[in-house]
Image (cartoon, grey):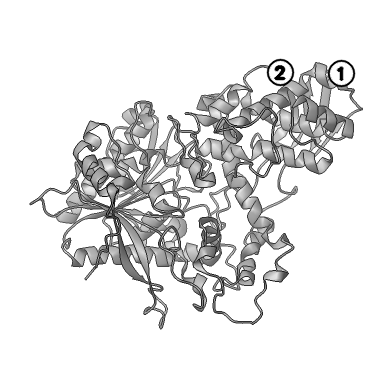
Amino acid sequence: CMVLLHIELSLSVILFALFEVIGSRFGGYPSTINCTWDFIQQPLSHFERGVAEKTFKQRLCIYRGFLKEGNTPQPIFLYTGNESPVEEYVNNTGLMWNLAEKYSALVIFAEHRYFGESIPEIESVTNCISYLSATEAIADYAALCNRLRKNGYSDSPIIAFGGSYGGMLASWLRILHPSAVDGAIAASAPVWGFPLIDSCPLDGSAQVVTYAASAAAGAAPLCGTNLKAAYVLLTAIGATQAGRDLLSESLHLCSSLNSPGDVADFLTYLQDPLFDLSEGSYPFPSNYITYALTNSLAKLPAWAMQVLCESLRPDFGVSISGQPEAVQFEVHIGQVSVSVDWDVATTSGTYSESEWVQSKALELVAAAVQGVQVWYNVSGSEGSCVNWNGEARLMTSSRQRASIRNILKQSSIEQKLPSTDTKECTATKSAVDPGTAWNLLTCNDGLNLVNWVAQGVGNDLYWPPNQPRGFSKLTVVPSSLAYCGYYRQVGLYGVPTIRDDWAFAIDTQYGGTRMVKSASNIVFSNGNLDPWSPAGVLESYLKSPTSTDNDLQKRGLKVKSLNGAAASLLSILIDMGGHHLDLFWETDSDPASVRAARQLEDEQIGHWIEQAIA
């Protein structure tokens, strides 16, 4: 039988009891203070012979406060934890809490293996990292469901919830183990973002960022054009040392631009936060993205990308001619013109300092710098100069991906090589921080999402292109997991020696786009401000099986049944939706689209529960 080990017996118990009294009925949000923290024993491997006797403790947050005595069978709502300590999801998944109260459900948030407090002891374990995989994590969740059903919840419907990678896990749990869960809400789950799925463009994320900076998404109308022009003009001005000195002084940089490399790094500084500001464009202030990336509790403002674009609202007199879609164009501002041919920007002559000033080019670049402070100065504590290359510079998704690509360039790698050619891990579990665990998971599963790998290639506001002219999946994909061999050199063994760059195993196991022919009882939701949405389950949206088309269209929600009349597999696109917005707590500022999405998800969950108990 399942043994639950209570680990919190302190002041939090008193606060927990108090919170149960006031609860969400009086405006309070349930959170980790409501959890009964327990552990269950899970095998290190559910599949490999001879390893099953090795175990680890998987942490659970359990809340029983919504259960009603005599109400049977009692539904169970299970959050399939993803790549962070589970507290992050407990505190932010308001949809699950709200609907659990409505359906009198048992609430369980399960932590993903190798994250938070669910990290196995790995030192001296042979191939210790090989057990960090989505397949093993899904088996953990399936085993948890089975244990629950063997211990008092035999007839209980179980509904899985998850966002982002957690949404992938929730949907894959339903696909692989349909007897474990009766339905799944998979929010912003990029399950169709792998190389073998043709519908996912390599620059899909960049296109969504560009949409988020457009008037259609509520941003200043000239924002996208002004940003692209600013990137080109910055590069042109910074081509000479005199121009770099002019930029350093006029932009109040803490560190001067002393080389073309510095200019390129500064340009990266201006572009890195755009992805995160787009996915973090919620209708309310939120620290969900800043905390996930930087452990900062400082909140981004509501509609963060719109806030960035406010500094780009003025008409600086910019015009762009030529063929931007081919990345062959000219930027004009005042009396200045800059020609662009792919990644090269040139001027017809040498412009003087006064000509650059009079053209308003410096004002435009300054506006772009001011805009990104919504990310870099989110705490409001930055000084009077722009610390563009400081050590304290906030991490962004783009910088994390860049750091992965640079791992093998570390000069100290040779010094970290183990002295013997053993496959027993020499590192301890303290080496498995969330960032390292995610990289290892990506390597083990071939979890190679490609929707973000290209930008500036003619369909977005970025410049210069980050890929060579003529690039394709055939040129990009084969090297995209090249960093994976690094971990063996630091005592973390078990990463496959033959990489699955094309994610063939994932396509085989979960069915790729073919899963629509067999899967059921899943809602895939995406937001049109979320750069991960191009990797999601998106189709040419038709109609909803549960609501009228006119009603949904007016409310900004597009819905399609992916399995025809059965209508048990739904794809929904939320207008003005950031990264899994539908999973958050309801607020008065929510757009009608996400209210409609939550209503539809509620209807589906009710239907799945009825099916399960019939």
444 to 359, vertically: above or below: below
Mark 1 or 2, closer to the camera? 1
Q: Which residue is mark 2?
A: 316
Residue 465: x %, y % from top left? 72, 43
Q: Secondary structure at mark 2?
A: loop
Please identify the quarter of the rendering in which residue 409 is found: bottom right
Residue 432: x %, y % from top left? 52, 63
- Asked if the residues shown at circle 1 and circle 2 are in contact, with their CB atoms under 8 angstroms apart, the answer is no
Who's the residue at 53% across and 36% down the image? 278
Please identify the quarter of the rendering in which residue 581 is found: top left
Q: Secondary structure at mark 1?
A: helix
Q: Which residue is mark 1?
A: 354
Does residue 73 appear left or right of residue 401 in this picture?
A: left
Please identify the quarter of the rendering in which residue 335 is found: top right
Q: Nearer the viewer, residue 612 or 148?
A: 148
User: The C terminus lies in which quarter of the figure?
Assistant: bottom left
- Tell me the crowding category of disc 2: few under 14, some 14 to 19, or many 20 or more residues within 10 angstroms, Cα based: some
- The first of marks 1 and 2 along the sequence is 2
